[in-house]
Image (cartoon, rainbow, N blue to C red):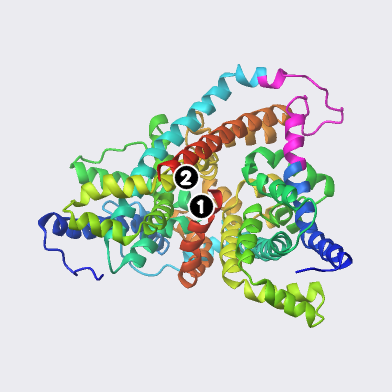
Amino acid sequence: MKRASGMEGKRARWGWVFVAPGLLFFSLFSWYPIVNAFVTSFTNRKLISLKAPKFVGLQNYVRVLSSEDFWNSARATAVFAVGAFVPLLLLSLLFAALIVSLRGWKRPAQMALYSPAVLSSVVAALIWLVVFDPRGLANQALNGLFGTPGIDRRWLADATMAQISTIVVYVWKYVGYFTILFVTGMGKIPDAVNEAALIDGAGPFRRFFSITLPLIRPTTVLVSVMILIQCMKTFSTQYLFVQAGAPTGPIEVMTLAIYNTAMRDLAIGRASAMSMLLFAVMLLLSWLQLRASRGGEDAL
Amino acid sequence: MRKPSIPKRPSELALFVLARLVVAGAAALILVPLAFMLSASFMPASDIVSIPYRWIPDGLRWKNYLQALAGNDGSWLYARNVLNSLVVAGAVAATTVAISASVGYGFAKFRFRGRNLAFMAVMATMMIPFETVMVPLYLVVVRLGFQDSYLGLILPFMASAFGVFLMRQYLLGFPDDIVDAARIDGCSEWRIFRSVVLPSIGPASATLAVLAFRQQWDNLLWPLLVVQREEMKTIPAYIVKFAAEKSADEGAMMAVAVIASLPVFILFLTLSKYFLGGSAVFAAGKE
């Protein structure tokens, strides 16, 4: 394949033409803002101010890291992320393993589990807001289950319960989504492997722990990190519950705190410092995932 | 090798039965809140908090839906906000597909200096969480004067790095011969893209469009930042305001929820392949 160099040059120019709109877009809406956020985090910039922002060094970071509010929202985010992570990972693994063992009805089962993920987060939170009503379904179900007479568990009024409620909403909404990811991962295991184990007399539990689990390790690592990162970005459920009167402190997650710092306190410098810290944690998680999945390739 | 339809070994049989029971139970449990939303949307508020809850409404109370659309103050803002969501999510889906296809095609089928660097620069943006850049983005939109406008809502989401990745992967498998044949026939590069490449990327486009549409249908944070005027709000922002009003009626709230969910559920039921498959592809893109 030999072409005249003028032809090559013309083709190369067309490559740039096709790529240019994207490069322009990502420069303006990804690269510029991240650089801007980084720079702003070292200034005392205010949202509505005519004064030019001043460089203040690490002052924002010092102030954020020594403020009780920041650690409170870091704690709220950690509680939420871990509290949602464990049930999400275990349940989606379990559901996926069971769905894979089904022959018919695979697709309807997947669609049913997945359906809450189709809703928008705010709608999910809105449904549960009514379910968590003192006279609502949540109390009725628990009282029915435990045979207790009309106890109100204060789903949205109590500090700890509010944290649990947001986790319930999230697990309900996303368990089907992560189940699908595991189903896909398990689908890549060759049938022959399982059949050989079956012939060797390995029971279902043995097959799950000795074959399925090791073979889907890359998927597990990926899904774990996806869950954690996604949980750290949670916003809608907490925002809606707070607006509807739930206690703010226990569920003021990081994104909500950043939003409030920027839009209510108008302290953009400080909000940027907070968002850079959030970014750093997410980067660390992604880096761990990369390392873990590289390690996984060797094991395979 | 065909599997036997019903396993004979006791442990296998137990799993066979248990798997069905657990999956059916989980599916039922997960569908309960959805059924609740639908049934409560036809009830007066007093019935929704009745103990015990009666699942079948006494009659279809369409008044809830009227109130949902008209709002507590009869302003019909919700109808307008639903339209805004459709416009924004639809426009984002269309532009994401178009721009990602163009950029993905450029990266997949052309050689030029700096290509790999440019591709890495685009891919690296996947690592940037929206929450980190939302404030600077807001300032950009303010400087451009696009607050309270469709442009302001759409602009930051018009393309996605994941979309570029998806299209590039898809087009790497597209035969060069077809492109070359079109060139020899004297087609312009632009014409080749429009009439040869674009029509052949259907599945990737559908996956991407569904993903982009849903993301914007769900987006609350960005509209909260850039929109102050009620009539420019999208559904999620409206719902938060509606739910926080003291006079809000639970029946009308659930009607609001049903209306907000109808378009995505219709998409889900007709294009479920792209929803389920798209999730998997999206995850694969992060590997």
Using the image as rendered, state which of residue B242 and residue B72 is in the foreground.
Answer: B242
The residue under label 2 is which amino acid type? Leu
Labels 1 and 2 touching (C-beta < 8 A): yes
Q: Is residue B128 above or below residue A195?
A: above
The residue under label 1 is which amino acid type? Ala
Residue A246 seen in this snapshot? yes
Q: Is residue A9 above or below residue A295?
A: below
Dot 1 falls on a residue whose secondary structure is helix
Tell me: B189 left or right of B206.
right
Using the image as rendered, state which of residue B217 and residue B124 is in the foreground.
Answer: B124
Circle 2 residue: A222
Q: Residue furthest front?
A: A2
Q: How many marks on residues?
A: 2
Dot 2 falls on a residue whose secondary structure is helix
Residue name at image x 35 percent, y 41 percent: A87
Using the image as rendered, state which of residue B201 and residue B272 is in the foreground.
Answer: B201
Residue B196 falls inside the magenta stretch: no
Tell me: A104 left or right of A238.
left
Dot 2: within a 10 Å radius of its alpha carbon, few (fewer than 14), some, or many (20 or more) residues?
many
Q: Quadrant of residue B151?
A: bottom right
Residue B39 seen in this snapshot? no
Q: Which mark is residue B131?
A: none
Residue name at image x 60 percent, y 49 percent: B220
Provide the major secondary structure of the magenta segment: loop
Residue B218 horizontal/vertical position (percent): 56, 54
Tell me: B198 left or right of A153.
right
Chain letter of the residue carrying label 2: A
Circle 1 residue: B283
Residue A270 horizontal/vertical position (percent): 69, 26
What span is in magenta? Answer: A32-61
Chain letter of the residue carrying label 1: B
Using the image as rendered, state which of residue B234 and residue B273 is in the foreground.
Answer: B273
